[in-house]
Image: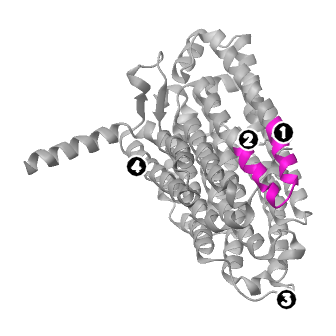
């Protein structure tokens, strides 16, 4: 009898293991309405955190499986691709799944006290529901192998994010206009994207990304395919916030609730970059990119422009949240430069920077959220002397700031070092100069934060005391991760290299 029970448990565990790709999305997606149906706001946060932690465990398991045994294909409902919707997990999207679920889990711990201060209690249930929907959408975008499914999940995540940003109106009414601008720009991007998908369907007669790639490879790229490429790149570019398609981002990051800024700052644009990579290198493939010259004529110039322009703008900001927003635009420039190099090393740099910048920005935005929790504002004038009042939070901000600059011993250094190596391999010495010069600009805007925290006198009426432990601990987890991944690079570099090999080799290597 005991043997039968053990055998049955093993079969159940094996069955669940087979369904991990769909459970990755299903867990937060089902948890979202359950939070509302529970009808008790005290349960909202624990349920959201539990769902996020389960998603993190699934993502870590999928990454380990993919690195050990290769890509995983899952046919939804038993309908085999290309007729049915396929969820496909390889090194690239497993890496992104880990980032998204990890950032969500860490920031949700931080969010418990932050949200209680910044958002009215009556809205907490709907807030965590929207959070879970945004998480499910981002995970769905990453794991699906169906082009139209990407659009569906993009809209699930985007609509939820608009709601999350607008909830900052309780602290600053400008959050409403920021959410509206985000809505208009996001909807425009989604419209361009779905038009591109329509052109792809007209040209190939299929929506499965692997099948589309096979049809394009077999029949060649005609005007319809080139038009589809243009629409998809512009539509995704709006989601990525490629300079100058970035206008929605600064206000959205500045006026959203602090926890929301940390979540979307560490995940949303990174998932959009992944979508851009997936379509460029798996669907259209490297040979097509060489033919249309999209990378050297369009992406690289705008990447370098973003690196310089956004960094310069960040230096002159007076609000720490807005400074970090412009810094994100500059960091996206580094990622796009790595993609534009069109080499395995460049792609590795882009993918590892996507991950490292995600954890760095999560740490920084949570740090500024703790300053807002204590001082009421993220303006430099309001955080003066906080290094003396909030030593733990302030020191964590400094550590994450060093990673943002790319100081040796931090995750940010690994990203930029690999990117410099890729540029040297290509003989692009001007790109090396651009990377170094913009890193020096990063010193400028990070130094302004250090100066405000440590070299100014605090408000004499403010008593010494850090943020609650439930906020400080997740900040330190993220800050410590920026140091950990600056030394322990086996997992990040290994996953990024495996993903880069698949992307650069094109469809054949991925499949």
For label 4, the crowd category at 10 Å Cα-Cα, with few meaning under 14, some 14 to 19 and many 20 or more, is: some
Contact check, label 3 and label 1, Cβ < 8 Å: no
Circles 3 and 2: CB atoms closer than 8 Å? no
In this rendering, the count of numbered labels is 4
Earlier along the polypeptide chain: callout 4 or callout 2? 4
Please give the residue where the numbered disc 2 appears in the rendered image: 240
Which mark is on residue 245?
1
Question: Of discs 3 and 4, which sits in the foreground?
Answer: 3
Identify residue for label 4. Answer: 61
In the picture as drawn, the residue positioned furthest to the left comes out as 1
Left or right side of 110 for 211 = left
Numbered range of the magenta stretch: 161-184
**Does the magenta segment cover residue 359?**
no
Element marked by disc 4: helix
Q: Are marks 4 and 2 in contact (CB under 8 Å)?
A: no
On screen, residue 2 versus residue 448, left or right, reads left
- Quadrant housing residue 162: top right
- Give me the C-alpha separation between circle 1 and circle 2: 8 Å
Q: In this view of the protein, which residue sits in the foreground, 281 or 132?
A: 132
Sequence-earlier tag: 3 or 2: 2
Residue 334 picture location, percent across and down? 73, 49
Which of pointers 1 and 4 lies earlier in the amino acid sequence? 4
């Amino acid at each position: 009898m005991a043997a039968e029970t053990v055998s049955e448990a093993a079969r159940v565990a094996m069955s669940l293991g087979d369904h991990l790709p769909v459970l990755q999305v299903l867990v937060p997606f089902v948890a979202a309405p359950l939070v509302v149906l529970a009808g008790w706001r005290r349960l909202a946060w624990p349920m959201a955190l539990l769902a996020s932690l389960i998603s993190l465990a699934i993502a870590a398991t999928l990454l380990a499986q993919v690195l050990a045994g290769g890509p995983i294909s899952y046919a939804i409902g038993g309908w085999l691709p290309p007729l049915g919707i396929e969820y496909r997990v390889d090194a690239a999207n497993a890496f992104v799944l880990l980032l998204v679920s990890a950032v969500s889990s860490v920031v949700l711990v931080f969010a418990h006290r932050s949200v209680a201060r910044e958002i009215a209690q009556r809205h907490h249930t709907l807030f965590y529901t929207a959070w879970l929907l945004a998480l499910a959408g981002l995970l769905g975008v990453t794991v699906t192998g169906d082009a139209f499914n990407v659009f569906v999940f993009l809209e699930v995540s985007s609509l939820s994010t608009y709601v999350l940003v607008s909830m900052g109106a309780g602290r600053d009414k400008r959050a409403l206009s920021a959410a509206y601008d985000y809505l208009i720009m996001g909807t425009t991007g989604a419209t361009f994207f779905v038009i591109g998908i329509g052109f792809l369907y007209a040209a190939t007669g299929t929506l499965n990304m692997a099948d589309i790639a096979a049809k394009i490879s077999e029949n060649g790229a005609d005007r319809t395919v080139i038009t589809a490429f243009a629409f998809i790149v512009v539509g995704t570019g709006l989601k990525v916030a490629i300079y100058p398609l970035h206008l929605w981002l600064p206000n959205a990051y500045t006026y959203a609730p602090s926890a929301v800024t940390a979540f979307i700052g560490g995940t949303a644009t990174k998932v959009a970059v992944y979508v851009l990579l997936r379509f460029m290198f798996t669907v259209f493939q490297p040979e097509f990119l060489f033919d249309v010259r999209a990378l050297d004529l369009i992406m690289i110039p705008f990447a370098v422009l973003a690196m310089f322009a956004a960094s310069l703008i960040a230096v002159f900001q007076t609000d720490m949240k807005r400074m970090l927003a412009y810094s994100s635009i500059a960091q996206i420039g580094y990622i796009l430069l790595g993609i534009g190099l069109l080499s395995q090393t460049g792609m590795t740099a882009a993918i590892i920077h996507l991950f490292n910048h995600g954890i760095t920005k999560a740490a920084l935005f949570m740090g500024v959220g703790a300053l807002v929790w204590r001082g009421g504002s993220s303006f430099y004038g309001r955080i003066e002397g906080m290094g003396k009042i909030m030593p733990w939070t302030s020191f964590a901000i400094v550590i994450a700031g060093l990673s943002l600059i790319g100081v040796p011993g931090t995750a940010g250094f690994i990203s930029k070092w690999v990117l410099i190596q890729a540029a040297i391999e290509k003989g692009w010495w001007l790109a090396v100069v651009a990377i170094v010069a913009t890193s020096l600009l990063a010193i400028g805007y990070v130094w302004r934060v250090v100066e405000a925290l440590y070299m100014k006198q605090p408000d004499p009426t403010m008593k010494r005391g850090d943020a609650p432990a439930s906020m400080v601990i997740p900040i330190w987890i993220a800050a410590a991760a920026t140091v950990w991944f600056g030394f322990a690079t086996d997992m990040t570099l290994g996953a990024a290299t495996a993903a880069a090999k698949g992307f650069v080799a094109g469809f054949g290597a991925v499949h």
